[in-house]
Image (cartoon, helix red, strand yellow):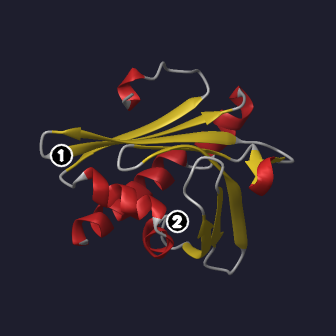
Amino acid sequence: MTAQDLPEHANDLVLTRLFDIPADRLYRCWTEPALIQQWFAPSPWSVARVDNDVRPGGHSLIVMRSPEGQEMPGSGVYLEVIPNRRLVFTDAFTQGWVPADKPFMTGIVTFDPEGSQTRYTARVRHWNAADRAQHEAMGFHGGWGQCADQLAELAARL
């Protein structure tokens, strides 16, 4: 299933790019901790730590750090993993399927080949309209857009 096959939902925020980069390189950047650390936070933020187990039910922890040193952990689990094609993850659960205190989103990231290019789509599905509005106000399009640029720059060098 491609990102275009997913029905739109009122609580989605979506970023799509067409990259001149093979899907497997983009997927590596999304799944290998050393690569995630190089692009996942919008500059001047950085990624302080990554601990992930990329498989359905596996955990994900990414700790972003502000320029002032404030750390923001993001944890969750992978729901679906199709190598080089699709990642689905959520913060509704933590490691061991423990329910999170305040679930915020489910991420659906796809890497769809289009000839020699890859259509990259990051869809963030929020639990409710208020969470969607909050994420958009926090700068979803600018932040995720900057991260997509950083992702492409890194993947092009692999």
**Residue at the spot x=49%, y=64% of the render?**
40
For disc 1, the neighbor class at 10 Å (few under 14, some 14 to 19, many from 20) is some
Q: Nearer the viewer, residue 134 or 55?
A: 55
Point out residue 127 in the picture as x, y percentages from the top left corner.
71, 31
Q: Nearer the viewer, residue 36 or 98?
A: 98
Look at mark 1 in the image and give the residue it sits on: 117
Q: Is residue 82 above or below residue 32?
A: above
**Does label 2 or label 1 sit earlier along the sequence?**
2
Point out residue 143 in the picture as x, y percentages from the top left corner.
50, 55
For residue 152, the mark is none
For disc 2, the neighbor class at 10 Å (few under 14, some 14 to 19, many from 20) is many
Point out residue 139 in the picture as x, y percentages from the top left corner.
56, 49
Quadrant position of the C terminus in the picture: bottom left
Look at mark 2 in the image and give the residue it sits on: 41
Q: Is residue 54 above or below residue 156?
A: above
Q: Give, as a three-letter code, the residue at label 1.
A: Gln
| SS label for mark 2 | loop
